[in-house]
Image (tube, rainbow, N blue to C red):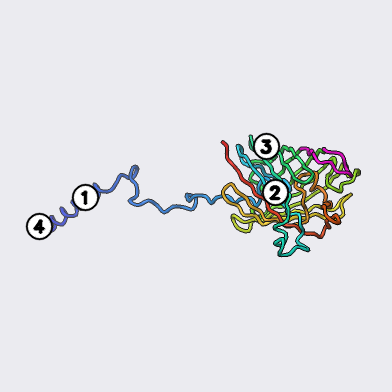
């Protein structure tokens, strides 16, 4: 056999082997998968809101997930930072007013519960409905209705019950900062020095919340001065969040944690010799603890 025939036969055999190893065009697959595209990567988790269903004292426009049970503890020291010393550990070993709250979210956007404040033995019952419970936009809105009943009677105000209605409007900026306004109507504000003409009170407390990291938030609330109020109320907090837990360290001049007491700033009367009436310039420490359970 000539060299030309041998070369032709060799080329024919090589072509046959390559054709047998190559997959058919319509059913074949590349030997190695293509590199993943950005669309195929797992989406990043959504940013956490800078507040829960309660900011510090004011209600948030959000509600807890459906089927969630929430337990809330408010703790406010009664001794002002001004004038305290090492004997009271700068007010941390002073007596405290404690509030206990419990709420449940049976349906998305609907939350109901109660809060018991130690001051005036105040019981608050409420229902809140978030109008934008599942929306992903920057705006949130909610309504909150309820009443307060006080089992402690004060000499200046023997009335023991009141009704309140609140609208909650919030806007979130860049997924990290939220501004909230809470227009509030209270049929009668309450406090140790509350006067009988403090009825049908309307005010617009406001709040600012900001996410510093994924688990640390800064929050502040302001209660504007209005009729019957000698000053502006304010309170701020640093909040640390964990799985179903929120812990806030608070500082401010507001003691009340129920709607009939925080809608306007009013002085507290403390027993002693002589009795002491607090000033709007007094500053008090405190904290909040929130625990959430998913029941279903």
**Residue 114 position within the rendered picture, expressed as x and y whole percent measured from the top left:** 71, 39
Residue to which mark 2 is pinned: 74
Q: Earlier in the sequence, mark 2 or mark 4?
A: 4
Mark 2 to mark 3 CA distance (whole Å): 22 Å
Q: How far apart are labels 4 and 1 at the CA level?
A: 23 Å
Q: Secondary structure at mark 2?
A: strand
Q: Which residues are magenta?
A: 146-160
Q: What's the distance in space between the residues labelled 3 and 1, CA to CA? A: 71 Å
CA distance separating discs 3 and 4? 93 Å
Image quarter where the N terminus lies is: bottom left
Q: Reading the chain from its start, which is encountered first: label 3 or label 1?
A: 1
Q: How far is the residue under mark 2 from the one under mark 1? A: 81 Å
What secondary structure is found at the residue carrying circle 1? helix
As drawn, the residue found furthest toward the right would be: 197
Lower sequence index among marks 2 and 3: 2
Crowdedness near tag 4: few (<14), some (14–19) or many (≥20) residues, C-alpha within 10 Å: few
Which residue shows up at 86% across the image and 39% down it?
Answer: 159
Q: CA distance from mark 2 to mark 4?
A: 102 Å
Q: Residue beneath label 1, please?
A: 17
Where residue 134 sits: x, y (%)? 63, 41
Nearer the observer, 212 or 188:
188
Magenta-colored stretch includes residue 147: yes
Residue at screen point 90% across, 43% down = 196
Residue 110 - label = 3
Please tell me which of labels 2 and 1 falls first in the chain. 1
- Quadrant hosting residue 234: bottom right
Crowd rating for badge 3 (residues with CA inside 10 Å; few <14, some 14–19, many 20+)? many
- The numbered mark, 4 or 1, whose residue comes first in the sequence reads 4
Q: To which residue does mark 4 refer?
A: 2
């Amino acid at each position: 056999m000539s060299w030309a025939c041998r070369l032709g036969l060799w080329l024919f055999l090589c072509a046959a082997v390559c054709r047998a190893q190559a997959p058919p065009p319509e059913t074949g697959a590349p030997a190695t998968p293509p590199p993943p595209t950005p669309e195929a990567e797992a989406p990043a988790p959504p940013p956490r809101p800078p507040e829960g269903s309660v900011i510090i004292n004011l209600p948030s426009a959000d509600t807890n997930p459906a089927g969630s049970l929430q337990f809330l503890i408010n703790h406010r020291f009664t001794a002002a930072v001004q004038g305290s010393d090492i004997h009271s550990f700068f007010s941390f070993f002073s007596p405290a007013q404690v509030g206990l709250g419990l709420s449940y979210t049976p349906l998305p956007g609907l939350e109901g519960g109660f809060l018991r404040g130690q001051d005036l033995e105040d019981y608050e019952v409420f229902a809140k409905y978030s109008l934008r419970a599942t929306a992903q936009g920057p705006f949130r809105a909610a309504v909150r209705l309820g009443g307060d009943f006080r089992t402690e009677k004060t000499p200046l105000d023997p009335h023991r019950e009141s009704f309140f209605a609140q609208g909650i409007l919030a806007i979130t900026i860049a997924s990290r900062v939220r501004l909230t306004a809470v227009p509030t109507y209270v049929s009668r504000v309450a406090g140790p020095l509350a006067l009988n003409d403090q009825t049908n009170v309307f005010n617009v407390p406001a709040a600012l919340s900001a996410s510093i990291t994924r688990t640390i938030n800064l929050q502040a609330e302001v209660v504007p001065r209005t009729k019957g109020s000698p000053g502006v109320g304010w309170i701020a907090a640093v909040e640390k969040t964990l799985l179903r837990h929120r812990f806030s360290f608070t500082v401010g001049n507001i003691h009340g944690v129920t709607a009939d007491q925080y809608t306007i700033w009013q002085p507290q009367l403390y027993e002693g010799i002589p009795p002491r009436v607090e000033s709007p310039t007094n500053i008090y420490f405190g904290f909040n603890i929130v625990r959430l359970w998913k029941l279903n």
